[in-house]
Image (tube, grey):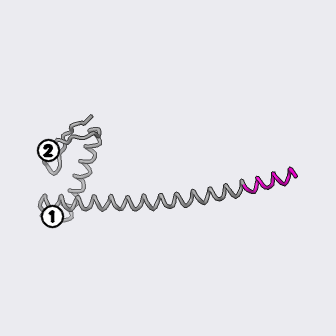
């Protein structure tokens, strides 16, 4: 069920219709406003349009960086998991061989 949340971005009010909870929508709006403020502080005199474009670029850059970090983390997780599985298989194989020999 869609929720309607009133948010303010750069002093303009918007009604956002979303399946997310209002708190989540407000958190996103606060994040976007924070990015706008970061850009405005670093580059005074920018129009709202240019500020919005730079904020979108920064947010997209952060998103892609997180995707790369997640991909790297998952690759390392997979590599370590496979190494542990190989070690477990090796130990279990040794135990199996010892059990067979002791039964002979």
Which mark is nearer the camera, 1 or 2? 2
Which residue: 20% across, 42% down?
16
Label 2 neighbourhood size at 10 Å, few (<14), some (14-19), many (20+)?
A: few
Query: From what the image shows, is residue 72 above or below residue 18?
Result: below
Q: Name the side, left or right, on which 96 lies relative to 47.
A: right
Relative image position of residue 74 (x, y in whole percent):
47, 57
Which residue: 66% across, 58% down?
87
Question: Which residue sits furthest bottom?
Answer: 43
Asked if the magenta segment contains residue 92, the reply would be: no
Determine which quarter of the picture holds residue 44. bottom left
Determine which quarter of the picture holds residue 49. bottom left
77 and 7: which is toward the camera = 77
- Which residue was labeled with disc 2? 13
- Which residue was labeled with disc 1? 44
Q: Name the side, left or right, on which 56 lies relative to 67.
A: left
Question: Which residue sits furthest right?
Answer: 104
Question: What span is in magenta?
Answer: 93-104
Which residue: 26% across, 38% down?
22
**Majority SS type along the magenta span:** helix
Question: Which residue sits furthest top?
Answer: 1
Q: Quadrant of the N terminus?
A: top left
| First of labels 1, 2 by sequence position | 2
57 and 94: which is toward the camera = 94
Asked if the magenta segment contains residue 99, the reply would be: yes
Label 1 neighbourhood size at 10 Å, few (<14), some (14-19), many (20+)?
A: few
| Inter-mark Cα distance, 1 to 2 | 23 Å
């Amino acid at each position: 069920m869609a929720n309607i949340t009133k948010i303010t971005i750069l002093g303009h009010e918007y009604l956002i219709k979303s399946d997310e909870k209002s708190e989540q929508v407000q958190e996103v709006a606060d994040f976007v406003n924070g990015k706008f403020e970061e850009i405005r502080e670093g580059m005074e005199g920018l129009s709202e349009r240019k500020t919005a474009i730079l904020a979108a670029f920064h947010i997209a850059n952060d998103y892609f960086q997180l995707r790369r970090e997640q991909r790297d983390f998952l690759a390392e997780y997979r590599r370590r998991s496979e190494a542990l599985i190989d070690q477990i298989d090796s130990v279990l194989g040794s135990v199996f061989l010892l059990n067979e020999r002791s039964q002979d």
